[in-house]
Amino acid sequence: MTAKKKSQKQQHHFAHDQGLLRILILCWLASILAGLTLHKILQFFPNHNISSLIPTFSFSSTSGEGSDASWKHVEFHGDVELLRRPMALVLEEYSPFFSAKATGLYAYRAVSTADLPIEALLHVFRDTPNNVDWVKDLKEAEEYHKSGTHHKEENVQVQTSIVRHRYNTPIFGMSDREYVMHKKMTAIERSDGTHSKVTYEFEPFDEKGDDLTMFSTSCFECVRGTKLSKWTFTSLDDGKKTKVELEVTVDPNIPSLSTFFVKLYQKSWPHVSLHGLMRVARHHLHRDEEIQVTNVLSKLFPLKM
């Protein structure tokens, strides 16, 4: 083989290797671009799993022991399971309160077990005005006309009140939504005064005349919506853990907006709010523990003036 032919062969191999190198570099750049795109998407939808944008196949949940079989599993958001059922199943009893469009919406259920004592969660939940710190899009919260607590039985406590919630609507130019509800708390107490199970039920309040004057900041420019919800707290593992169950049925009364966007928003509300409650309760618990440790240390090692 002459030197000229060897040179031509080497040039051919070099050109072939260059082509492979270009392909590898392009594939590497494409993978980086895909990763950056996915990162941007996750940043843009901080409160939604990507799976929430893709149609899912529903199947029966196995986590909600004793729960209504009409609830169908949708997806998991971290340690929170999300379920749903057609809103039409709950409209028969409350039909006067809901709009015609509500029949195409869903009621949602969120379930989680928190590594927190029930009292830590209840301490945050009962603080109605500060619910705005953890409930998704809640702008104002008021509570009035609390009943005197009484015991139907020796260990059951019942309390009723009227609450008003004002929610920010995450759509530019759309009025805030307002919900006025009856609130009923049913608590099962242990002999030491702690709770084994507490349920909060919220139902539409049909006010008459000037009943809304009880609320100091009632929003007259808001649009009235309809909301049913139920929060159940069950103490587990000798008080170390708490099972939290949230059921919510909401008709925001937005006839001009496609039900697709209403469903997308409502789908995120339960798990975001439940995660928010656990986050704030955990923060308060750690803060209280730090205060207790500081008090003990100050007694053991008092500062000398």
Image (cartoon, helix red, strand yellow):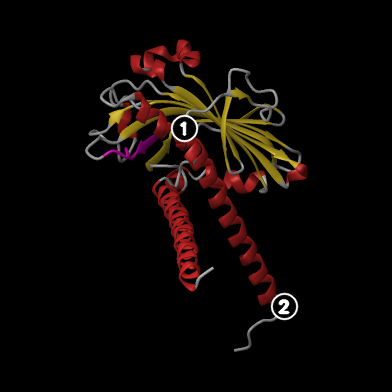
Figure check: 87 above or below 112: above
Residue bearing the label numbered 2: 300
Q: Position of residue 300 (x, y in %)?
A: 72, 78
Which residue type carries mark 2?
A: Leu
- Going by the image, does 81 lie left or right of 171? right
- Going by the image, does 286 lie left or right of 257? right
* Occupied quadrant, residue 286: bottom right
The N terminus: image quadrant: bottom right
Q: Provide the secondary structure element on which disc 2 rests.
A: helix
The magenta segment: 162-171
Which residue type carries mark 1?
A: Ile
Q: What's the CA distance linking mark 1 and mark 2?
A: 59 Å
- Categorize mark 2 by other alpha carbons within 10 Å: few (<14), some (14-19), many (20+): few
* Residue drawn at point x = 35 percent, y = 38 percent: 167
Q: Position of residue 170 (x, y in %)?
A: 32, 40
- Going by the image, does 49 lie left or right of 223? right
Residue bearing the label numbered 1: 54
The foreground one among 17 and 127 is 17
Nearer the N terminus, badge 1 or badge 2? 1
The foreground one among 163 and 175 is 175
Q: Position of residue 208 (x, y in %)?
A: 32, 20
Q: Position of residue 88 (x, y in %)?
A: 46, 14
Magenta span: predominant SS is strand
